[in-house]
Amino acid sequence: MNKRIPALVLAAVMAMSAAGCGSKTATDNTNSTDATANTDTAQNTATAADNDLVIAFNTDVQSLDPHNTTDTLSISISNTMYESLITFDENQNIVPLLAESYKAEDDNLTYTFTLRQGIKFSDGTDFNADAVIANYERCLADTTLRQNSNVKKWESVTKVDDYTVAVKLLTPDSSFLNRFTQFDMISPTALENGVDLNKESAGTGQYVFKEHVEGDHVTVVPNTEYWGTKATVDSLTFRAVPEDGSRIAMLQTGEADFIHPMPVIQAQEMDGQDGIVVERTPSNIMRYVTLNTTVPELSDKRVRQAMNYAIDKEAYAQVVFNGFCEEVLSCFPSTVSYYAEQTPYTYDLEKAKELMTEAGYPDGFSLTLWGDNMTIEQTGMQFIAQQLGQIGIQVEVVPMEPTTLSEMIYMPEEENDVQMWYVNWSAGSFDADGSMRSILHSDNVPPTSANTAFFRNEEFDTLIDNAKLTTDTQELTDLYAQAQAIVWDECPWLFLGNDDLVFAHKSYVDGIVMAPDGSLDVTNATLAQ
Amino acid sequence: MGRYVVKRILSVIPLLFVISILIFAFIHLIPGDPVRKMLPKEATNEEYLALKEELGLNEPLPVQYLDYMKGIFQGDFGESYKNGLPIREILPDRMAATLKLTFAGIVWAVVLGTLIGILSAVKRGKFLDYLGMVIATSGISVPSFWLGLILIQIFAVELGWLPTGQLDSWKGYILPSLTLGCSIMGTLARYSRSSMLETLQDDYVRTARAKGQRESLVVLRHAFRNSLVQVVTVVGLQIGGLLAGSVLVETVFSIPGLGRLMVDSIEFRDYKVIQALLMFFAVEYITINLIVDLLYGVLNPKIRYD
């Protein structure tokens, strides 16, 4: 006995050492018989072991209350159980969902929605105009709900008849419909009874709540009374798996059928292994560096343009995102409506140096660059520092813990020390106003919001303010195109790129659509049996 | 002993009070607040200030502290800013996960650590001794994060024997607890070896041998029992380390325990959750210390409590 134990221990240590030295090789060659067998099963037959779909995300759900969702995971889960009157289709066009049709009245303030009839919430309550009003009243009364900031811009929601409601705005708002897609319907009976939405659901969606283990997973099961196309999977579990390596391992072993995000570093290597399919889709994430225009050196447009010419965007996409990043030719990505392509700042060091000389800075100057302390963010910041170093700008990279950084960023102007901020922005409602107003309008310099370039351009402000007031598509196209041209020429930012969303799934999974904001549409999800 | 226990417990009350003030003060000294995290990023400063007021976070710190303590005395730890759930609902499941994991980690550590320690001491200077110490040193040196990923790669991905994490079944405990217990195993092996070596040279061990008792009996009944006092001390001291180590292990193995909750809460500045967690850790440390002190008396009757 005494001799066996050390031998076993020795064997284990040797196995661990071998794995530690060459785990990649082992994975690549699938040396293990069992692993090869599993791989063969997955690749040859491409069928799932069961009909339970497990989706692993890198974060934990924040809220199961559809009026209070802020993160894409919460939105994805919420969308399985709750529905809104209108929604986005796969191409980000607005289409009716619980409404049969809708129209904007001539006053530019009122929108009338005709509701579908015969729909019930999962608790048996009828969906009708009263239900819409009850949801409006709830969001208006509770200021802690995220939807509160939307509904307080409405003057009223009135019942025209049992299946028609009219939403009247306080002021015209061209982005209203985009934002209205996020206004999900909860059963008025559940609202009245104060149902805890973290423990049960009361929506009209394709799924109903089954289980929520805080910090671990949320499981939903098909709503047998669903009014539309019924779900084909037996259950749907969203699991929180923060560690990248563990998330990939779960996909390899089949414990997860779909993972998001797939780390860009491993994406190419994993594609095709163990029956794994890696996919990418354009996001609505704009990646940029704000240039504080109140800093003397950065107040000169020529300097800001020179900095844009000094960045090799292709190399940036390769170095930081392993190629999973698209070139962007405006101040927001092409997935957002009214995107207007501008002339690129093609990487040109000579031109950059010329502009620097013209501006009176032939030898450059020093700046600090703030950003999150995550590895990928720091890589991006180091890249920017290296690139700007080529035209004599010495950049000190200052990575900070995200919440601390947030406090520093939102300091009032006189106390705010930001010079450059490496950041990204995305508007969940995919609208041009949401993609520019908070970060470029002069009303929104800190502490009001995140215009940390302190970009103040009256013409730009007027253009987007006017665009907000119209619903005429041609007018909106013109106004937003002019606004984008100003930002592009003025360069309050370094325009870096548009992140791809990278996700992976087993080859037997089909029908899951990822929206540009990273939220999932699982309406047509299937597992091949 | 009863009087001793009561005295120790009573002395904890003022200590916890001081700890609660320190925790509260330090948490609020960290830059950043939860309000920005709670609001959508396009929220205006007015919305920020309104929510801050609603949550009572614009009140002076002493007022906030008193409100917090008032809640605690009524058994209400408040609600998480992050997900709105009552803390008294969040903590039990999280505690259960971490405590089960910690317990399983200690079992591994004690069993393997003492076994290696005894074998190394008995076979001092021989191959088994060197091998045992190599394992012990490796256990201490290997980062748990790396070890966890390697174990997942071998036993979950390559061999398919065990799950990658989650404590849904007994199988799910094996890899995380082994990862967690590894460093204590190493420490324990080294301590129990040196303790055993010392005890094996004591007179009463020589007497036992002289009486003709079997070597295994001499080692286990006489020498090992006396060396246990040191083992218990080390285990007691290291449990705190295990809780800290659980942050990484829970992340690697996707376990919703206290470690992950702590990291998430600090990142979110979820003040009330952080306060509740730190208070729990303080109480846990104090309790473990008390248990260790009481165990000394059980293991060595010569130790008396006054």
Image: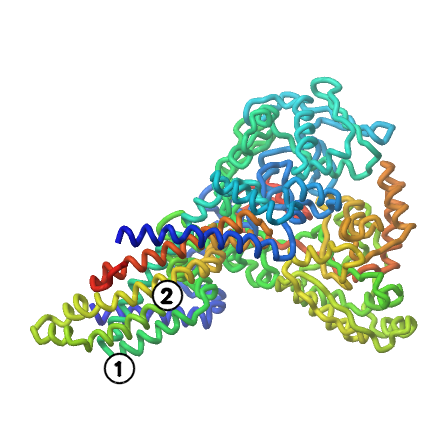
Can you say whether A509 is above or below A142 in the image? below
**Up-down: is A185 above or below A260?**
above
Kindly identify which numbered label has been placed on residue A522: none
Q: Quadrant of the N terminus of chain B?
A: bottom left
Q: What element does badge 1 sit on?
A: loop
Viewer-side residue, B152 vs A423: A423
Quadrant for the C terminus of chain B, please.
bottom left
Residue A88 x %, y %: 70, 39
Q: Chain of mark 1?
A: B
Where residue A361 appears, as percent x and y from the top left, is: 87, 74
| Residue B275 coordinates in the image, percent (x, y) | 52, 50
**Residue drawn at 60 percent across, 45 percent down:** B63
Q: Nearer the viewer, residue A415 or A498?
A: A415
* Mark 1 or mark 2: whose residue is earlier in sequence: 1
Q: Callout 1: 10 Å neighbours few (<14), some, many (20+)? A: few
Residue ID for mark 2? B184
What colouring does the structure picture have? rainbow
Q: Which residue is mark 1?
A: B125
Q: Position of residue A435 (x, y in %)?
A: 77, 48
Which quadrant of the structure image shows residue A86? Answer: top right
The secondary structure type at the circle numbered 2 is helix
Instruction: Kindly identify the residue that appears in the image at 61 percent across and 60 percent down.
Output: A264
Work out whether residue A267 can be spotted.
Answer: yes
Looking at the rendered structure, the kind of residue marked 1 is Gly
Residue A287 image-quadrant placement: bottom right
Question: Number of labelled discs?
Answer: 2
- Give the residue at x 34% y 63%: B235
- Disc 2: host chain: B
Mark 1–mark 2 contact, CB under 8 Å?
A: no
The lab-note entry on whether marks 1 and 2 share a chain reads yes
